[in-house]
Amino acid sequence: MFNKKFNLLKEATEYGFMPYMETYILDGKKRPIVVIFPGGGYGMVSEREAERIAMAYNAAGFHAAVVYYCVEPHTHPLPIQNAANAVAMLRENAEKWNIDTDKVIVCGFSAGGHLAASLSALWNDSEIFSEREIELAMHKPNAQILSYPVITSGEFAHKDSFKNLTGTDDESNHLWSSLSLERRITDIIPPTFLWHTYEDICVPVENTLMYAAGLRRVGVPFELHIFEKGEHGLSRVSDELIWSKRKFEREYPWLSLSVDWLNQLF
């Protein structure tokens, strides 16, 4: 395995942070790659949704990478630019790392789901990427996996995510509206796998439901799984990952379902 960290900016930000990507590239043949954006409300990057997810996709035969993107006090558009830099870097090194450039999958959790879905919707935005020296298509995802994603800034918003991303708690600010992703759904979005839990009170299931409805309207194919039980941030359920003392009697099969979906898609 090729496991290495790569900086995503030429210089650290004004706050002294250097966003980076850690690769988990398998040996041997050319493979798809799953690019993982952990959650954290745009206030941190959660380890619960990082390496263990990469290793699980490795076990299923996929290359993987985890992106440690800019969070608060950094604001939009830095996170999406970090995400784009990561995807472009993977494509630029595809021959050396045996990556199938037509099978680049973004995989996001919670606020990381918002980031993945933002890149899927806005990869060709010439204002966000005005300083790019390469073709915008270099950071276009071919598929996306969204796990209990933050989508809307409206009634069912996880407001702290939008506050951290925009730098303001003023809900009338134009960024709250423009980064509410149910408003940004078009047919340039790639095929999508979504899952959520009915019991999620942190990021309500309506985020996923309204996003799926929007994909349906524009003809983007998707697979959707709603599990009844389970709090927010399940990642891959195990005792050390659950914030509360509640025990879960089942393992949620979302990852194996996503692998089946990817194998069918590609």
Image (cartoon, rainbow, N blue to C red):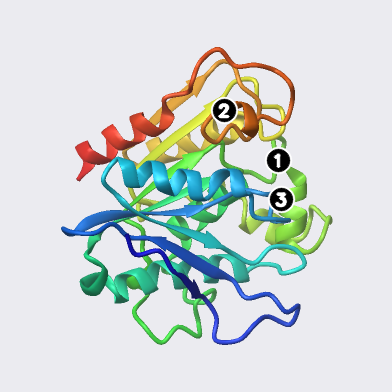
Rendering coords of residue 148 (x, y %): 56, 36
The N terminus - image quarter: bottom left
Q: Residues within 10 Å of mark 3 (few under 14, many from 20)?
A: many
Q: Kindly indicate the quadrant of the structure image that contains residue 65.
A: bottom left
Q: Nearer the viewer, mark 3 or mark 2?
A: 2
The amino acid type found where label 3 is placed reads Ser
264, above or below 93, in the image: above
Viewed as shown, does residue 64 lie left or right of 166?
left
Rendering coords of residue 78 (x, y %): 61, 71
Q: Kindly indicate the quadrant of the structure image that contains residue 173.
A: bottom right
Q: Residue at x 65, y 82 (%)?
A: 12
Q: Residues within 10 Å of mark 1 (few under 14, many from 20)?
A: some
Viewed as shown, does residue 154 lie left or right of 77?
right
- Label 3: which residue? 161
Number of residue marks: 3
Q: Mark 2 or mark 1: name the one nearer the start of the chain.
A: 1
- Label 1: which residue? 157
Residue 60 in view in this figure: yes
The amino acid type found where label 2 is placed reads Ser
Viewer-nearest residue: 61 or 71: 61
Rendering coords of residue 15 (x, y %): 76, 78
- Label 2: which residue? 238
Element on which disc 2 rests: loop
Q: Residue at x 46, y 44 (%)?
A: 53
Viewed as shown, does residue 177 lie left or right of 219?
right
